[in-house]
Image (cartoon, coloured by chain):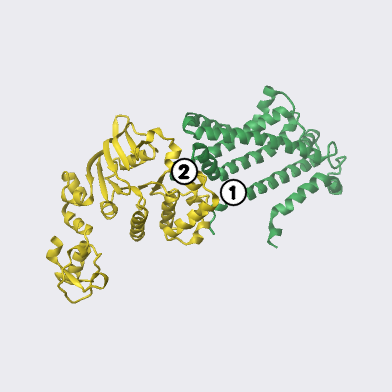
Amino acid sequence: MRWLRDPLLWLLPLLLFLLLGMPLLRPIFAAAFPTTTPPVYADDSFFALFLFHAEYVVLSSLAAAIIGVGLGIVATREWGTEFRPLLEALATIGQTFPPVAVLALAVPAFGYGPVPTMIALTLYGILPILKNTLAGLGSVPVAVREAGEAMGLTRFQLLRDVELPLAAPTILAGIRISVIINIGTAAIGSTVGAVTLGNPIIGGLVNGKVAYVLQGALVVGVFAIATDLLFERLDRRLRRFATRD
Amino acid sequence: MIELDRLTKTYGARASVSDVSFTVEKGVFCAIVGSSGSGKSTTLRMINRLIEPSAGSIRINGENIATLPVEGLRRRIGYAIQSVGLFPHWDVADNIATVPRLLKWPEERVQQRVDELLAMLQLDPAMGGKFPHQLSGGQQQRIGVARALAADPEVLLMDEPFGALDPITREALRAELSRIHRSTGKTILFVTHDIDEALQLADVIALLRDGKLVQFGPPIELLTQPADDFVRDFMGGGTLGLKLLALRQVGERVSPEPVPGEPIAPETTLAEALSQMVLRRTSRLPVRGTTGGANGSIGLSDLIG
């Protein structure tokens, strides 16, 4: 019964239940928060909010991954090494910024709505991916790269068949950090006019309805943990060549 | 045939290799010897264009390599290095198959070649499915050599390939390489700082010092006619005579006079024979007769020759 111990097996149904069956928890919330009416957030369905939320996260993370990995590759090519110090500094400085601050800065620049949210998410999401791409490509042993070159691999083949596969676990770790941060930050997008799982949280905070805050936070939290576990599984698959048996 | 013609590599004002010329005939095992910083690795790496020369040229079978497409050139040249550099995410079979696959051999022929090479390097056929980190250092280097030989290259370049191995493994791999060289007739250029390794393996030695070629010739010539004191010292100084003995076999000096005792093989080197004389406290050793012939013997004075 080993598979029963896999937390993902419990978390995915739990997420689905929270998205579709939140109204079923009405008696619990009614008992805990008797002054809140209705006791369960009902302005939008949690499932619809989740779909919007997930869409922002997926699109922004995808864009961040393409840009982050792309910049990382450029900076580690022979002709692109001049960009490396600049990009490394940017990635490091950028990460000391809280993600909320990025969102706050996006509003004056891009206005309200889902677009500024996604731009902010993308920009912030690039940083950990870029940093890890640089680290991952940088950790490919010199001897391995030299051997590949000496065997007659073209530069493209060396990148595709040797460097990227070896850097993949590190790059994936960067994408994982980026996606998890984005799941949390996207919720704050509700403050700038995007429809996300942050709607019940922000609405609850504004109107003093703690039950809504709790319901929204619960869904975002389970979403983030389930996603993290999915990445962990992917990571184990990528690293299988490096594990001793 | 590999011709190095006034080969020079400068980094800024410093010449790492300067004006080096020598020719290695087809099928010859050439050791490039020198101390650290003598430019031996740089010289080797210019042959597969991992480094581009600042001046001079290299011709392989008469073709100037600077005019050839670099990837195509490298796929024709085997390359093995001390740190091996196996691809850690590929299993042993895929590692060996690197160049044949780049050359788009049919998959059937690739598999056949991998099996052939595992056998040639005396490795278990089941090893093909293992990953590099599961192997010992000696096994990894055998795979490294197999990968270098995979596409049956005309030329094999080796940069201190056995330098990081323990003495017993190193000795086994040297013997293996010697056997492969005899059976395949490849032209081999082998960089080492270990003069004994060079003497044991090479047909010709190129001795470098500060980027310049000091002497080029068969081992016996470097031992008996060193160009200068540096060569003499590098070849062993006071122990030069012993190195000379290590190049010759007992079989060449045996006399028919029989003596009692455990006979030594005629392939034993004269150096080992001398060692046996010291150990056995005798000046004459019995030698096993070749192919059923009567036992002979070798005396201390025969060693001097």
Under mark 1, the amino acid is Leu
User: Whole-percent x and y of residue A152?
Assistant: 46, 41
- Front position in the image: B105 or A42: B105
Q: Number of marks in the image?
A: 2
- Front position in the image: B297 or A2: B297
Tags 1 and 2 touching, CB below 8 Å: no
Residue B54 makes an appearance in the image: yes
Question: Which of the numbered marks, if any, corresponds to residue A238?
Answer: 1
> Looking at the figure, which quarter contains the C terminus of chain B?
bottom left
Query: Which chain gets the yellow colouring?
Result: B
Query: Which chain gets the green colouring?
Result: A
Residue at x-position 47% and y-position 46%: B99
Residue at x-position 41% and y-position 35%: B68
Q: Using the rendered view, name the quadrant where residue B241 is placed.
A: bottom left
The residue carrying pointer 2 sits among few (fewer than 14), some (14 to 19) or many (20 or more) residues within 10 Å by Cα, namely many
Q: Which residue lies furthest to the left in this view?
A: B301
Estimate the spatial distance between the alpha carbons at disc 1 and disc 2, rounded to whole Å: 21 Å
Left or right: where A31 falls relative to A233: right
Chain designation of label 1: A
Residue B91 makes an appearance in the image: no
Q: Name the residue under label 2.
A: A148
Among numbered discs 1 and 2, the one appearing first in the sequence:
2
Is label 1 in a helix, a strand or a loop? helix
User: Whole-percent x and y of residue A6?
Assistant: 69, 56
